[in-house]
Amino acid sequence: MGAKLTSNIDCIRVRVTHTAPSGASFVSIISMDLDPQDLKFPTANNSTDCTGLTNPSNAHTCNDSFAVAAGDIGAWNTMYKTFGFAIPAENTITNVELLASWKATNVGATLTLGIGKPGTPDTCGNFTNYPEGNASGSDTSDGTGQFQHPVFDVTNTGHSWVPSD
Protein backbone atom coordinates (compact mmCIF):
# COMPACT_ATOMS: atom_id res chain seq x y z
CA MET A 1 0.00 0.00 0.00
CA GLY A 2 1.57 3.29 -1.12
CA ALA A 3 1.62 6.65 0.56
CA LYS A 4 -1.50 8.79 0.23
CA LEU A 5 -1.70 12.53 -0.14
CA THR A 6 -4.29 15.26 -0.22
CA SER A 7 -3.59 18.68 -1.68
CA ASN A 8 -6.33 21.30 -1.80
CA ILE A 9 -6.08 24.18 -4.26
CA ASP A 10 -8.36 27.07 -3.34
CA CYS A 11 -7.49 29.29 -6.30
CA ILE A 12 -5.13 29.98 -9.18
CA ARG A 13 -4.56 33.51 -10.50
CA VAL A 14 -2.36 35.38 -12.96
CA ARG A 15 -1.22 38.94 -12.28
CA VAL A 16 0.07 41.07 -15.15
CA THR A 17 1.61 44.51 -14.65
CA HIS A 18 1.85 46.74 -17.70
CA THR A 19 2.58 50.30 -18.66
CA ALA A 20 0.79 52.61 -21.04
CA PRO A 21 2.70 54.24 -23.89
CA SER A 22 4.64 57.37 -23.03
CA GLY A 23 2.30 60.28 -22.41
CA ALA A 24 -0.80 58.10 -21.80
CA SER A 25 -2.46 57.95 -18.41
CA PHE A 26 -4.02 55.01 -16.62
CA VAL A 27 -7.79 55.31 -16.70
CA SER A 28 -10.74 52.99 -16.79
CA ILE A 29 -12.86 53.41 -19.86
CA ILE A 30 -15.76 51.21 -20.88
CA SER A 31 -14.29 48.31 -22.91
CA MET A 32 -10.70 49.52 -22.47
CA ASP A 33 -8.62 48.79 -19.41
CA LEU A 34 -5.48 50.85 -18.95
CA ASP A 35 -5.12 49.98 -15.26
CA PRO A 36 -1.43 49.19 -14.66
CA GLN A 37 -2.07 45.85 -12.95
CA ASP A 38 -4.59 43.12 -13.71
CA LEU A 39 -5.24 40.10 -11.47
CA LYS A 40 -7.46 37.52 -13.14
CA PHE A 41 -8.90 34.13 -12.27
CA PRO A 42 -9.43 31.45 -14.92
CA THR A 43 -12.93 30.87 -16.23
CA ALA A 44 -12.23 27.51 -17.87
CA ASN A 45 -10.05 24.44 -17.45
CA ASN A 46 -9.22 21.26 -19.30
CA SER A 47 -7.82 17.92 -18.15
CA THR A 48 -8.12 16.03 -21.45
CA ASP A 49 -5.49 13.25 -21.53
CA CYS A 50 -4.16 14.16 -18.04
CA THR A 51 -4.71 12.83 -14.57
CA GLY A 52 -6.77 15.85 -13.61
CA LEU A 53 -7.72 17.38 -10.30
CA THR A 54 -11.08 16.53 -8.76
CA ASN A 55 -13.48 19.49 -9.08
CA PRO A 56 -10.95 21.67 -10.99
CA SER A 57 -13.47 24.50 -11.44
CA ASN A 58 -13.32 25.11 -7.68
CA ALA A 59 -9.92 26.82 -8.22
CA HIS A 60 -11.56 29.51 -10.40
CA THR A 61 -12.18 31.67 -7.28
CA CYS A 62 -10.78 31.94 -3.74
CA ASN A 63 -13.69 30.69 -1.64
CA ASP A 64 -12.56 27.68 0.44
CA SER A 65 -14.07 25.32 -2.14
CA PHE A 66 -11.19 23.22 -3.42
CA ALA A 67 -9.83 21.53 -6.48
CA VAL A 68 -8.33 18.37 -5.00
CA ALA A 69 -5.42 16.06 -5.73
CA ALA A 70 -5.90 12.98 -3.56
CA GLY A 71 -4.86 9.36 -3.53
CA ASP A 72 -1.61 7.59 -4.24
CA ILE A 73 1.38 9.86 -4.64
CA GLY A 74 1.55 10.98 -8.23
CA ALA A 75 1.07 13.96 -10.48
CA TRP A 76 -2.21 15.70 -11.29
CA ASN A 77 -2.43 18.15 -14.18
CA THR A 78 -5.15 20.60 -15.06
CA MET A 79 -4.81 23.38 -17.60
CA TYR A 80 -6.46 26.60 -16.41
CA LYS A 81 -7.31 29.07 -19.15
CA THR A 82 -9.47 31.94 -20.34
CA PHE A 83 -8.28 34.53 -17.82
CA GLY A 84 -9.98 37.38 -19.69
CA PHE A 85 -7.18 39.91 -19.88
CA ALA A 86 -7.91 42.96 -22.05
CA ILE A 87 -4.53 44.69 -22.13
CA PRO A 88 -4.32 47.33 -24.86
CA ALA A 89 -1.98 46.26 -27.67
CA GLU A 90 0.14 49.39 -27.29
CA ASN A 91 0.94 48.69 -23.61
CA THR A 92 4.20 47.10 -22.48
CA ILE A 93 4.05 44.14 -20.10
CA THR A 94 6.54 44.61 -17.27
CA ASN A 95 5.70 41.71 -14.93
CA VAL A 96 3.87 38.37 -15.07
CA GLU A 97 3.19 36.37 -11.91
CA LEU A 98 1.37 33.13 -11.12
CA LEU A 99 -0.39 33.04 -7.75
CA ALA A 100 -1.98 30.20 -5.85
CA SER A 101 -3.65 29.50 -2.54
CA TRP A 102 -3.23 25.87 -1.52
CA LYS A 103 -2.59 23.50 1.35
CA ALA A 104 -1.50 19.91 1.78
CA THR A 105 -1.57 17.36 4.57
CA ASN A 106 1.75 15.79 3.58
CA VAL A 107 5.22 17.18 4.20
CA GLY A 108 6.96 17.57 0.86
CA ALA A 109 3.85 17.72 -1.34
CA THR A 110 4.68 20.09 -4.20
CA LEU A 111 2.53 22.48 -6.19
CA THR A 112 4.07 23.40 -9.54
CA LEU A 113 2.52 26.06 -11.76
CA GLY A 114 3.58 26.74 -15.33
CA ILE A 115 2.38 29.17 -17.95
CA GLY A 116 2.20 28.52 -21.64
CA LYS A 117 -0.08 28.06 -24.58
CA PRO A 118 -2.42 25.27 -25.59
CA GLY A 119 -1.66 23.18 -28.62
CA THR A 120 -3.94 21.70 -31.22
CA PRO A 121 -5.92 19.87 -30.04
CA ASP A 122 -6.17 21.58 -26.65
CA THR A 123 -4.90 18.71 -24.47
CA CYS A 124 -2.26 18.29 -21.77
CA GLY A 125 -0.05 16.40 -24.20
CA ASN A 126 -0.01 19.37 -26.58
CA PHE A 127 0.48 22.12 -23.98
CA THR A 128 3.69 24.12 -24.47
CA ASN A 129 5.29 25.94 -21.53
CA TYR A 130 6.78 29.39 -22.17
CA PRO A 131 9.65 28.96 -23.16
CA GLU A 132 10.83 25.37 -23.12
CA GLY A 133 9.44 24.80 -19.62
CA ASN A 134 11.24 27.69 -17.91
CA ALA A 135 8.11 29.69 -17.03
CA SER A 136 7.12 27.85 -13.88
CA GLY A 137 7.55 27.75 -10.14
CA SER A 138 7.18 25.22 -7.34
CA ASP A 139 6.13 25.44 -3.70
CA THR A 140 6.64 22.62 -1.19
CA SER A 141 4.20 21.91 1.62
CA ASP A 142 5.24 21.99 5.25
CA GLY A 143 2.53 19.38 5.93
CA THR A 144 0.68 21.47 8.53
CA GLY A 145 -2.47 21.79 6.46
CA GLN A 146 -2.20 25.59 6.66
CA PHE A 147 -2.74 27.65 3.52
CA GLN A 148 0.33 28.64 1.56
CA HIS A 149 0.26 31.54 -0.91
CA PRO A 150 3.19 31.28 -3.31
CA VAL A 151 3.82 33.91 -5.98
CA PHE A 152 5.90 32.76 -8.95
CA ASP A 153 7.45 35.53 -11.04
CA VAL A 154 7.66 34.24 -14.62
CA THR A 155 8.56 37.57 -16.22
CA ASN A 156 12.20 36.92 -17.06
CA THR A 157 12.04 33.45 -18.51
CA GLY A 158 13.21 34.17 -22.03
CA HIS A 159 9.70 34.80 -23.35
CA SER A 160 8.95 38.28 -24.68
CA TRP A 161 5.54 39.02 -23.17
CA VAL A 162 3.05 40.89 -25.34
CA PRO A 163 -0.57 41.88 -24.61
CA SER A 164 -1.89 39.12 -26.92
CA ASP A 165 -0.29 36.40 -24.74
Image (cartoon, rainbow, N blue to C red):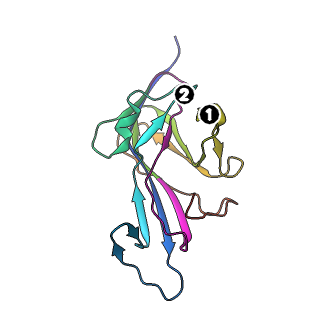
Q: Residue at x 40, y 55 (%)?
A: 40
State the mark number for residue 130. none
Task: Assess whether mark 1 and mark 2 are in contact (beta carbons under 8 angstroms).
Answer: yes
Magenta residues span 70-98
Q: Which mark is residue 121?
A: 1
59 lies above or below 159? above
Q: Nearer the viewer, residue 41 or 30?
A: 30
Residue 118 in percent (x, y) is at 60, 42
Q: Give the quarter of the image for residue 119.
A: top right
Three-letter code, disc 1: Pro
Amino acid beneath label 2:
Thr
**Does 71 appear in magenta?**
yes
Instruction: Work out how far the residue at label 2 is from the one at label 1, CA to CA, in angstroms.
Output: 10 Å
At x 49%, y 89%, the residue is 23
Q: Is residue 33 above or below residue 124?
A: below
Q: Quadrant of the C terminus?
A: bottom right
Q: Position of residue 1 (x, y in %)?
A: 52, 10
Residue closest to the far front: 31
Question: Reading the chain from its start, which is encountered first: label 2 or label 1?
Answer: 2
Q: Which residue is mark 2?
A: 48
- Label 2, secondary structure: give it: loop
Does the magenta-highlighted stretch encompass residue 72? yes
Q: Residue at x 42, y 64 (%)?
A: 38
Nearest-to-viewer mark from 2 and 1: 1
Task: Give the left or right position of residue 46, taking residue 29 as reference.
Answer: right
How packed is label 1: few (under 14 Cα within 10 Å), some, or many (20 or more)?
Answer: few
